[in-house]
Amino acid sequence: MPLPPPSPAIAGIQPYRVPRHGAPLDLYLDGIGGLQPPADLFGRLADADPERLVRQYPDTAPLAARLAERLGIGTDRLLVTSGGDDALDRACRALLAPGRSIVLPEPTFEMIGRYATWTGATQRTIPWPRGPYPVDAVLAAVDATTTAIAVVSPNNPTGAVIDAASLRRLAAGAPDAVLLVDLAYVEFADEDLTDVVLSLPNAIGFRTLSKAWGLAGLRVGYAFGPATLVGWLRAAGNPYTVSGPSVHLACSRLDDGVEVDAFLDRVKAQRDGLTALLAGLGADALRSQANFVFCRTPHAAWIRDGLAGLGIGVRTWPGHDHLGDAVRINVPGDAAVLARLTASLRTVLAPEAVLLDMDGVLADVSGSYRAAIVQTAAHFGVTVTGEMIRAAKAVGNANNDWILTRRLMADQGVDVPLDQVTAQFEARYQGTAASPGLKATERLLLDVERFAALAARYPIAVVTGRPRADAHAFLDQHGLGHLVTTVVAMEDAPAKPDPAPVQLALTRLGVTRAWMVGDTPDDQRAARAAGVVPLGVVPPGEDPTVSAPVLTAAGAARVLPDVTALLELLP
């Protein structure tokens, strides 16, 4: 039997998700960005009663009392919810329906629009790209059907705000509509509008312990306003939305105000510096009063990808009608993390040099080094296939083909001393006076003219696992030797994925910021560990649909179809 169609309220709507790059991330600056919770947070559950916190339905009254006291209101005017999202959803359910409308700026917190869609209400969007909240335009859009007006301040994702006078004017200008004033980031703003919201008869405020307080995983937020409106919100949702342990920990966390205040001061101090850095790197960075900086740039997608290659996640909106060129970056509030972020941004947007692996990037070695592995193994009675070599390279720690050959043979039970393997390998690769050897099959993957154009813009280092003599021989044979500033070869440093050869290249070039192109996971890991933007390239003869995900998983910011694509990507 076929399933029935979904409700019109959700038809065509995709589940919410933050689009993330496929490279491994260890620093997430694309989401909450709040204070790290104290190490002893969960230890504060030790003296709690499991019967009360776990076995019984949760009671939010203790937390509601603490929060209401902080706001100077009665508990009838405050509702504890499962994060600010739950409160906003309840407000939309309570106020919106088919035949009613909501006016909301754009861009703004995207879940408000989703909640409105689920109710069947009409949405009227007013542009708010930057600057003061567009009070006049919003009021002009209000009509007899309007029952709600959205105000997110500081706005997500731009960080712009509404001031107290404008908020009062908005409320007075639309007395029959309820202002939904989302103050999720208000702790970071110059002005706290909580008391203003509480003074208005037609406004509901929303706050959260997710952002400044660092409790996003506990899902604790609250709504406040006139008792009648808050009562509607109580009726518009489930009765037990915040768990007992979350209530207990949130109450405890409210005692950490001094720590939170110090964090807020650090974020505010760092915010202007990050804004100035992005502007200096060519982005249109807006002044923000949130814990993030928002900018627009034609290089938004590359900023996301390049930073991901260095393990940092930032927020972008690929394919979005209004935010396709936008980037939002959380301000870390930690000096060491900020130093890493700023260095990474400079590396991504203003590299000083280009590093290139040789095999598979400059040289097609499918008929030389790869063939030498197969033939050497066959000499010792072992069958090694091209697929076996590709699989070993994908795993990593396979930068030295002599060692790799020996390992592939040992995997099949034939253990031969490395010097014997090396001798047979070199005989086939180097050849003799009578036979040129497999190295004669190598061809250049980047024509000399384009290589010269690249060298005219950036100093170039070749970072290869080849012996030095072989590396220079290939470069000189193809007329590239004079265009390369330095070569880091097998004899100079430990093999990739150790970052040492990449770091040595930076030292020799006298730079700190660079991009590196390589065809193996070892290349990506070495570059990333050295603070160099890793770029993958699919070597000749390999399936991009197979190779590209492997390189991305190893850290590649992007996987290029060939090394010539680098010229278009570089600034």
Image (tube, rainbow, N blue to C red):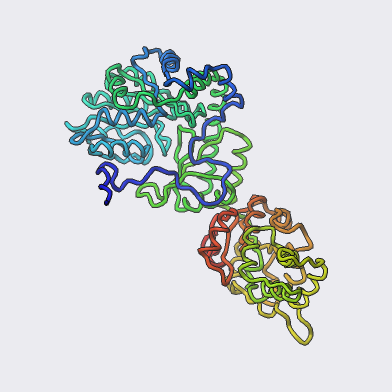
Q: Dividing the image into 4 quarters, which one contains the C terminus? A: bottom right
* Above or below for 271 versus 374: above
Q: Name the one closer to the observer, 3 or 309.
A: 3
- State the residue at coordinates (61%, 69%): 451
Q: Is residue 75 left or right of residue 492?
A: left
Count up the numbered dots: 0
Q: Is residue 137 visible?
A: no
Q: Position of residue 471 (x, y in %)?
A: 72, 70
- State the residue at coordinates (53%, 27%): 264
Q: Position of residue 406 (x, y in %)?
A: 75, 66
Q: Position of residue 407 (x, y in %)?
A: 73, 63
Q: Name the one closer to the observer, 348 or 16.
A: 16
Q: Is residue 221 visible?
A: yes
- State the residue at coordinates (62%, 35%): 335
> Residue 332's quadrant in the figure?
top right
Q: Is residue 322 left or right of residue 172?
A: right
Q: Is residue 394 left or right of residue 212?
A: right
Q: Position of residue 534 (x, y in %)?
A: 60, 56
Q: Name the one closer to the observer, 327 or 69.
A: 69
Which residue extends farthest front? Answer: 1
Q: Name the one closer to the observer, 381 or 464.
A: 381
* Above or below for 191 versus 352: above
* Above or below for 40 versus 523: above
